[in-house]
Image: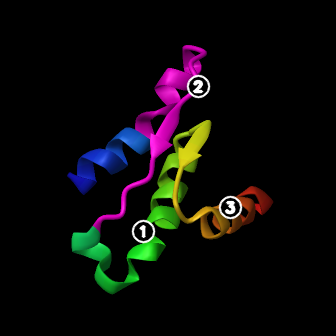
Amino acid sequence: RVRHQMNVFLNSFRLRQLGWPVCHALPHAFDFFREEVRSAEPFFAVMAALGRTSLFRTHEVARTRAVLETLGVY
C-alpha cells in the first residue's frame, strides 16, 4: 500500500499538466514508522512535493511546513 501511495505522489505532476489542482492526504504508515509515526507525514510530503502537489492534508502542519520550506530553499 505504501509503495502505491508513493507512486501516486510522484506521478501527480501528470494531473498538474492538465491544469488540475492536486490534493493529497498524507499517510501515517504505522507499519514502517512505528513509534516515530509523527515523522511519516513530513516524509510523504517530500514525495508529494516532488510530484508537484498543490494542497497537502496533514495533521502535522508545523513539521510538514518546515520540511516543505526547507525544500523550497534548494
Judge whether 73 appears above or below 1 on screen.
Answer: below
Residue 16: quadrant of the picture: top right
Left of 18 or right of it: where is 6? left
Q: Does the magenta segment cover residue 14?
A: yes
Mark 1, secondary structure of its residue? helix
* Circle 3: residue type: Arg
Q: CA distance from mark 3 to mark 1?
A: 13 Å
Q: Residue furthest right?
A: 73
Mark 2, secondary structure of its residue? loop
Provide residue 54's location: percent of width, then percent of height. 62, 36
Which residue corresponds to mark 1?
A: 40
- Which is more N-terminal, label 1 or label 3? 1
Which residue corresponds to mark 2?
A: 21
- Which is more N-terminal, label 3 or label 2? 2
The residue drawn where x is 35% and y is 50% is 6
Q: CA distance from mark 2 to mark 3?
A: 19 Å
* Circle 2: residue type: Pro
Left of 52 or right of it: where is 65? right
- Which is more N-terminal, label 1 or label 2? 2
Give the colouring mode of the picture.
rainbow
Q: CA distance from mark 2 to mark 1?
A: 23 Å
Q: Quadrant of the C terminus?
A: bottom right
Which residue corresponds to mark 3?
A: 65
Q: Which residues are magenta?
A: 10-29
